[in-house]
Image (cartoon, grey):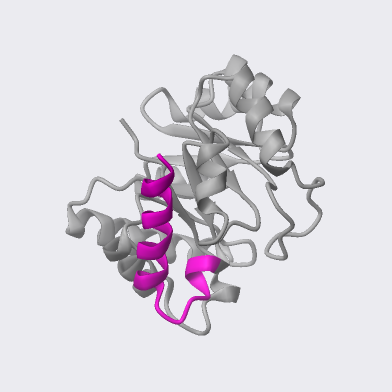
């Protein structure tokens, strides 16, 4: 059973010059339960190096924390990641499942109720609903779903829901109470002065809301 409660999405551009592996190590110490490596601008070799470093870290920690790779099935397969996360313009879920088999997780981004219902019908393992609130960490996204959007999607699907977009310590609890199983954050941890403390504060809000 995967714990999606505090889901970290990496972003080298927001890391304040720090190595991704160090941010992830600190964030896990603070309570992160799932890690997605997102490298929008790295070439394939650099992406592979980053992915391998994170995979080695997670294995060494023996923490049973899954590593998901954003978009790139080839990178996920090459380093033996636990799964991939795909957006609406990425490879269709059915094709990804055919390549990855049933042992790897496939998460799907949903920007609407219809996206979420389709993802569940097609066999996704979890759904990333986005954006919940206004966010500056990702361009060209749909209008914010808000807490009511989470409630509508929760009522329609039974898969784990991970909410992303503008989530931080002050609103994480409300997101969980609205029906999300977990919150995914980028800048709230990656750009924090102390990623460990930021993760701990988020984890406390999530646990209090349950």
- Give percent across and percent down for residue 120: 58, 20
- Give percent across and percent down for residue 102: 40, 22
**Residue drawn where x is 36% and y is 27% of the image:** 103
- Give the image quarter of residue 171: bottom right
**Residue drawn where x is 53% and y is 67% of the image:** 188
Q: With respect to residue 38, does 124 lie above or below?
A: above
**Residue drawn where x is 35% and y is 61% of the image:** 54
Residue 33 on the magenta segment: no
Viewport quadrant of the N terminus: top left
Main secondary structure along the magenta-highlighted residues: helix
Specify the farthest residue to the front: 208
Q: Is residue 58 left or right of residue 121?
A: left
Residue 199 on the magenta segment: yes
Q: Which residues are magenta?
A: 188-210
- Give percent across and percent down for residue 191: 53, 75
Viewport quadrant of the C terminus: top left
- Give percent across and percent down for residue 86: 60, 40
Query: In front here: 156 or 57?
Result: 156
> Is residue 67 shown to the viewer in this render?
no
> Is residue 45 shown to the viewer in this render?
yes
**Residue drawn where x is 35% and y is 39% of the image:** 3
Specify the farthest residue to the bottom: 17
Query: In front here: 73 or 175?
Result: 175
Q: With respect to residue 49, does 147 lie above or below?
A: above
- Give the image quarter of residue 157: top right
Specify the farthest residue to the top: 121
């Amino acid at each position: 059973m995967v714990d999606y409660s505090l889901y970290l999405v990496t972003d080298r551009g927001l890391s304040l010059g720090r190595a991704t592996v160090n941010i992830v190590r600190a964030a896990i110490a603070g309570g992160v339960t799932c890690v997605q490596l997102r490298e929008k601008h790295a070439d394939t070799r650099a992406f592979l190096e980053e992915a391998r470093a994170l995979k080695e870290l997670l294995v060494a920690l023996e923490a049973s924390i899954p590593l998901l790779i954003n978009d790139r099935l080839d990178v996920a397969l090459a380093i033996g990641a636990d799964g991939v996360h795909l957006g609406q313009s990425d490879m269709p879920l059915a094709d990804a499942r055919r390549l990855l088999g049933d042992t790897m997780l496939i998460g799907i981004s949903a920007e609407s109720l219809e996206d979420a219902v389709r993802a569940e019908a097609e066999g996704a393992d979890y759904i990333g609903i986005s954006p919940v609130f206004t966010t500056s960490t990702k361009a060209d996204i749909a209008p914010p779903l808000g807490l009511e959007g989470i409630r509508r999607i929760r009522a329609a699907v039974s898969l784990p829901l991970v909410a992303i977009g503008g989530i931080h310590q002050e609103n994480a609890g409300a997101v969980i109470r609205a029906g999300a199983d977990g919150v995914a954050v980028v800048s709230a941890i990656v750009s924090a002065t102390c990623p460990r403390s930021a993760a701990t504060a988020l984890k406390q809000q999530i646990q209090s809301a349950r």
